[in-house]
Image (cartoon, grey):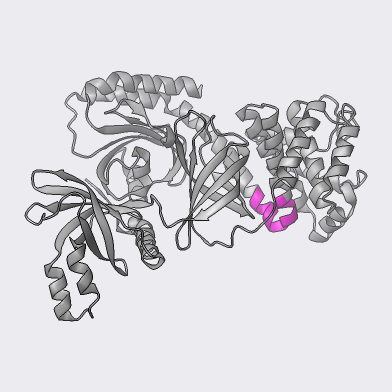
Amino acid sequence: MEIFNLEIIKRAINIFSRTLFQNKELFIGLAVNLEGTSFLNIFTFDNLNKEYFEYSEDVVFEVPQKMYDVFEERRESNFRITFSNEFSFLINNRFDNFIIKTILLPEKGKNYGFFYLIYKDEIVFDNKDVFSRFISIFEKNIDAVYFNKYSKYSINAFVKNYLMLLQNHSDVLYEHSLRVADLTNIIGSLLGLDEESLYKLQIASFIHDIGYIWFSEKALEELFDLQNGNEKNPMISMHLKRLEEMFFGNILMKPYVDLALNHHENMAGTGYYKKKNLCIEDNILIVANYIDENMVLSGNQETESIIEYLEKNVGKLYDKNVVNAAIEAIKIYYTEFDNGKFSELTLKSRTINLRYEGLGEELIELTGSIEKVLGDTLYVNVRTIDQINIGSILKVKITTKDFPLIAKAQVILKNPYGYVIKIIEKRETKKSKLKVFWNFEFLIGYKNEITPLLKEKLTPVIWNVLKSKMKPARCKVFGAEGIIFSINQEHDIFKKDDVVIIYIDKIGEEIFIPASLISKKKGLYYTEYEAKFFELPERLQSAIYRIIFRRQSSIRKIGSIYEL
């Protein structure tokens, strides 16, 4: 249903966009409402290049409250956007300033989402009848797209709330549930399960012990003290009943609850519900739960005895293929990766950049967010792709307190939300491709003229002499390795390969940066240069990073959105 309805919409874009928009540089998109001001971007179409942005699909973003309030009042709106993190990423940061035209797509009074056009200059739609027919395609199919997309996010919302309850009640059980989810995903991946099955296993793993929130901390401590949970303990059967009751009547959660209820069953039919006919997902969850209960909850942490027990009961209690995959999962998850500290670094941002280049393949770059850090293991929420799987080696960049950390990591787990990666090699670098689009004025002059003056005491007289030897310029892109800027031709005294000094006084930092001009493009009124910074001392490089970080964090504050 989802694919079918999206194909209708995309086919309409292919047909109508040529008539309505020709080869104009604009972007066509669709977003559905999740909750409040949160929306899920379904796709973004680049009209000029006639392609869909792959990494803009299925991304959650926030609509500014001002725009959302307009949705409540009327169906159609036009906004001028400046420096918007909420929308710029949807169009791969093609524009700094742009207009977004939105048309709400309601059905029976419900806000299902909106169609949008993003463009730089005002566009007049000559044929309004054709445009109305174009919009009608979105209207007729938005409800089906909405329900297919929203159902999965509703499930995630349910699980997130219940996991929070479990964490507040017992950190031990909360961490156990997360580890079981990791294990089921590794086992399932090794067995070649599809994404839907892996997702089902993950949700079931998260909720399988949620019924224990009805028991006191003291009762839970006694349960943990009884190794393997004691099969006769009534608390185990009771927590299964509580789990069933908590989701009774919830149609969306039923497949996941049914799977979670079987985690104390076995192939011999001697479990709590005496079930013998177990599917592959049942067997994976049963084995994963047994492993972590005996590896961590019991306090034994002895892999040999657990592997021996699993092998002994192959074909009796546990599926043979699942056991073989589980033994590999034990080696991957518990023994091959240590629990060392994450280099004692303080993360400044949760954003992480992943780079992957397979043998003979093109470079793939992904940007995600760090959800959790356990030692040198990072849980990364990011769009997954077929080329990156368990065992893949990635280059990663993480923004730490003072500078980016460049590292090498191995994928140890792939799930519907992203990847779990293990840092295997790290290095702190002064060089980085970190950059920010930024329009500000600065001064530039020849290095051989400026350097002698900087050795003097900077009195007001020296300052005046210094500034007289420099020319005003305007930044376009400011980065850790260099700067792209323009200069009015009446001030342009430079040429390619000149060595210069750049003076910047921004966001609490006042710095002089030596650089060389590596490119020059002459325009009608302005000349554009690209300058590459010299190898800089740590103090100066850190100042550059601070300027970039502060600018990035202030973009939301200085950005503007107003209705046209």
Instruction: Relative to 22, say whether 561 is above or below.
Output: below
* Total number of numbered discs in the rendering: 0
| Outermost left residue | 490
Q: Residue 447: x, y in percent?
A: 21, 63
Pick whichever, 400 or 298, lies toward us: 400
Pick whichever, 264 or 320, lies toward us: 320
The image quarter in which residue 475 lies:
bottom left
Q: Is residue 171 magenta?
A: yes
Q: Residue 253: x, y in percent?
A: 65, 36
Magenta span: 163-175
Q: Residue 526: x, y in percent?
A: 12, 48
Residue at 86 percent across and 35 percent down: it is 310
Whether residue 478 appears in this view of the structure is: no
Residue at 80 percent across and 42 percent down: it is 291
Image position of 308 (left or right of 72): right
Pick whichever, 429 or 403, lies toward us: 429
The image quarter in which residue 263 lies:
top right
Image position of 304 (left or right of 54): right
Q: Is residue 131 magenta?
A: no
Q: Main secondary structure of the magenta part?
A: helix
Q: Residue 294: x, y in percent?
A: 84, 47
Pick whichever, 507 or 155, lies toward us: 507
